Amino acid sequence: MKKRAIIVMLAALMLLAAVTACASDSSESPSGGSQGSGGSGGDSSPATPARDPSLSYSGFNPADYGMEPFASPVTILIPVFDRARDDAPDVANNYYTRWVNDNFGKALNVTVEFVPIVRTDTMGSYNLLLAGGDWPTVFMEYDWPKVTQWAADGALGEIDINAFAQTAPTWFEKAGGQSMFDMFQVNGKYMLAPALRPYWDTNYTYVRFYRKDWFEKAGIELFTTWEEYVEALELFVELGYTNGKPILPKKPFTENFQFYNDSEWPRDEEAWVMFSDVNVASLPANGAYNLLKKENILYNKGLYSDEFELDVEGAGSAVQAIADFINGENYLYENYLAADMPDLTAFFQNNPDAKLGVVYNNTVFDPWVDSMGYRVVPQDRATNPAGFFVGFSDQATADELKAAWLYMEWMAQPDVLDYMQWGEKDKTYTVNADGSREMIGWEDQGDYWMGFSNNKDYWAIVIEVRLTGTIEETIAAISPKGIPQDLTQELIDNYYFQRAQADAGLYYCDPFFSVDISSVSEYAGALKGLFQEYATALVKCDPAQFDALYEQYVKQYKEAGFQEIMDERLAAYKAGNSSKLPDISAGRAPFVPYDHTKVTSNKYTIK
């Protein structure tokens, strides 16, 4: 309770964008859902409220799935990411939030309120809600340390797994059933429901696009060594491709500082436990040193803006870096795949003769190149075995809890999920001659305007990606449309390349701790500011001073709390309270040097 009080006090001091929601009016403990998939089972049924005739209703009635209305009105608060994008509607009030209430809510006497969560400060947004007493009924987050922090702080209630499976059987089975829930217990308790994430051991939906036409005009191939990479960037600036501007880095330094491709191989398992995390940057890690050293070289060659750290992080990249790409002044753009990618649309409008290619993930540099004085093997962070980790407020009443479970079960129904993912025929998508659906650009969707990435932040409570048959068909459906290039085959090749890397043990998850690492929540805020300061200074310093400065900053960083994080994680690992690396990643099995030029799969040979 003391820890929660500290968190609440800190949250109240945070100056963030206002986040509004309705508070639960009761702290009654959930009673579990002993009445199957129905509602409250009260004696009196409420009158059906009037429906909005402009919204679609056919086939989406909860009664069709055995759900019954609650006798008394129930309000549930469902978080939704606010990404502050001009190409997406108001996340809390749009066609689909009204559609949910008219189809699900009114039929069950439930009001669904969508609570904006600032995507770039998830924990800050939730902490403001907790501080104000406006606890959401549902908590959703991708990062395991954040959700275990909620559990440790008392924000989440324990899930009656049998009642949940009975009330939301479709959702439960889609997520993987009992075995998936067993994987993600906290202190031996079921505190979180893991939503489905297909193909989780790759990261194929996050793609890097590069200016293939720049390489062709310059008469060079896509770089495969560090030296070739630096030479290419220098050449692009020299030839005027960047309009005289330096190449901006991917984004400013944040806690999400990933250096997998610059880490030792095979991975030392204890180092992996202490340093593999996207919530607190691991400045002392070997990979962090290597990556910052490379950034320092690029900066001192004049390839980074003098004020790159002032850029604001947006979706996937820094905002200025995205603008530079759209304006034809940056060679790289990276983001999550979607059929409608406004940044790519704008790019081709400004650069109609351009040609893009796909950089196969972490194959920019050949393996075993020792040009920086350390061992390099292409490796990467696999996504979580689950998508959203879904938890439920410890303050939710029995009816609120059951309504949230029914909301998840309703959203998991194939016809409901399909509508939330695709929208309305001829309004948000069309059907081509092959019978495949193609999305209409967001500018032409009118009143049916879909949210970010085809409403993903709403339906991701069920599944992390929009599946359409085979993996090839799924990628074809989410490959960018409405641009002059068809990149589908390259994107399929990218998946199979990652599939081969994963099979070779080169994709691995961060550790999952079954206990809360309390030092993370205690020190994360202060360490974030220190890391931004230290990392920026290291990139900008004289190369001759880098090593001494790095050693000084690592000492100060550990003293500021990171040593306690390292110690607590390692103790949890030694006590058997964390996951393990795959054998090959930890060097526990005979290891054969990996040559990415010879990777094959059952369908593709990647060259």
Image (tube, grey):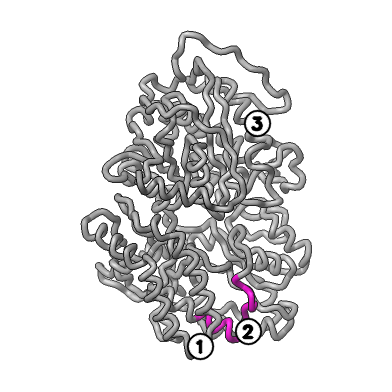
In the image: residue 523, left or right of residue 93: left
Residue that protrudes farthest toward the bottom in the picture: 544
Secondary structure found at label 2: loop
- Whether pointer 2 and pointer 3 mark residues with C-beta atoms closer than 8 Å, the reply is no
Which residue is tagged 1?
543
Which residue is tagged 2?
302
In the image: residue 414, left or right of residue 331: left
Q: Quadrant of residue 592?
A: bottom left
Residue 519, x across and y down, in percent: 35, 58
Residue 415, x across and y down, in percent: 56, 31
Tell me the kind of residue under disc 1. Answer: Pro
Q: Nearer the viewer, mark 3 or mark 1?
A: 1
Please tell me whether residue 297 belongs to the stretch shown in magenta. yes
Along the line of sight, which residue is nearer the eye, 172 or 605? 172
Along the line of sight, which residue is nearer the eye, 544 or 513? 544
Secondary structure found at label 1: helix
Q: Is residue 69 above or below residue 147?
A: above
Mark found first going from the N terminus, 2 or 3:
3
Q: Quadrant of residue 223?
A: bottom right
Residue 346, x across and y down, in percent: 74, 60
Residue 234 disc label: none
- On the question of residue 148 being in view, the answer is no
Residue 355, x across and y down, in percent: 70, 68
Secondary structure found at label 3: helix
In the image: residue 568, left or right of residue 343: left
- On the question of residue 425 being in view, the answer is yes
Q: Residues within 10 Å of mark 2 (few under 14, many from 20)?
A: some
Magenta-colored span:
294-309
Which residue is tagged 3?
98
Residue that protrudes farthest toward the left in the picture: 575
Mark found first going from the N terminus, 2 or 1:
2
Tell me the kind of residue under disc 2. Answer: Gly
